[in-house]
Image (tube, helix red, strand yellow):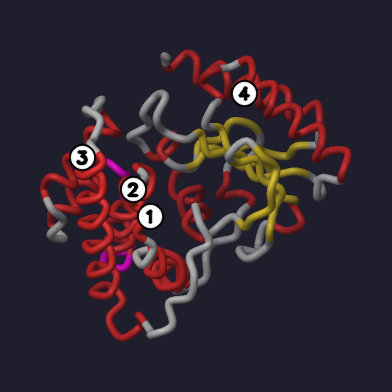
Amino acid sequence: MTATATDHVLKRFVADVRQLVPTTAVWAHGSLALGDFQEGRSDLDLIAVVESPPDAAQRERLAGLHQRLLDEEPAAAKLHCSYMPAEALAGADTDHVTWAHATIQERPVTPVTRRELLDGGLTLHGPPPGQLLPPLAPGQLEDYIRRDLREYWLPATDRARLWLQDIWVDLGPLVLARASVTLRDGRLITKGEALTELLALGAPADLVRDIRERRYADPLPLTDAERVRRGERARAFLRDGILNTLGTDAGTDTGTASGI
């Protein structure tokens, strides 16, 4: 897979989506916009600003568009898109029609995504994010990050079976590293930069190497015993790291993780 394949998918998506719903802008965030994009491994994280909330018929047509892309374009396998009505751009807690993980669902566009867009979102169509998105309120990003660590990731460390999966081992520690930097310095970092931060946070070197190799290389498969041991170390590190990061804000009621 080449960069040309990604460019082709993005151009096709923008052209096709504009035929289905009135579209004001299309932006990319995440690694595609901020750096460290890895062909075939990184998500294509998109936002489409639409004139009004997609109705049932439009939702069905959008699902069809995404399914055709999946069927016809290998580079579209990890393309996600949230459809934000222009009238609702200010509401960080508002659910928006979203294509993710091969299904139409509804979820908010988080303060982290909004900050990514405002800091360096890639404009694929229409005005840039800074012309349409309102700035975040003071403390809004930090409050969201603390809540995400406390209410989502901390409970997840109690669920041992989750940590047998690569996606949890890869994502959890990186979320902690990125959160730590944002809470400390007020800036966002890439996943690649987060790998270096993990070592500074005291993550086991072999765990960091495992995550790095899966992102940038092709590691050998693990045995069942190795997978169990890795999962135990990952969730123990993450739990301790979250508690240290949150301090007295960690609370005692960890609830139940909602899943990735």
Q: Are marks 2 and 1 in contact (CB under 8 Å)?
A: yes
Q: Are marks 1 and 4 in contact (CB under 8 Å)?
A: no
Mark pair 4, 3: CA separation = 29 Å
Q: CA distance from mark 3 to mark 2?
A: 13 Å
Circle 1 sits on which residue? 161
- Magenta residues (range): 183-192
| In this rendering, the label closer to the viewer, 3 or 2 | 2
Q: Which mark is residue 70?
A: 4
The stretch drawn in magenta includes residue 204? no
Residue displayed at 38% across by 85% down: 252
Q: Nearer the viewer, residue 161 or 72?
A: 161
Q: Position of residue 66 (x, y in %)?
A: 68, 29
Q: Mark 3 vs mark 2: which is more N-terminal?
A: 2
Q: Amino acid at mark 2?
A: Leu
Label 1 vs label 3, nearer the camera: 1
The numbered disc on residue 164 is 2
Instruction: Report, in whole angstroms, how far the alpha carbon at label 4 lies from the one at label 2.
Output: 27 Å
Label located before the other in sequence (1 or 4): 4
Residue labelled with disc 3:
210
The disc, 4 or 2, on the residue closer to the chain's N-terminal end is 4
Which secondary structure, mark 1? Answer: helix
Looking at the picture, how far across and down is residue 112, in whole percent?
Answer: 47, 57
- Tell me how many marks there are: 4
Residue drawn at x 29%, y 33% is 215
The image position of residue 131, as x and y in percent, is 61, 49
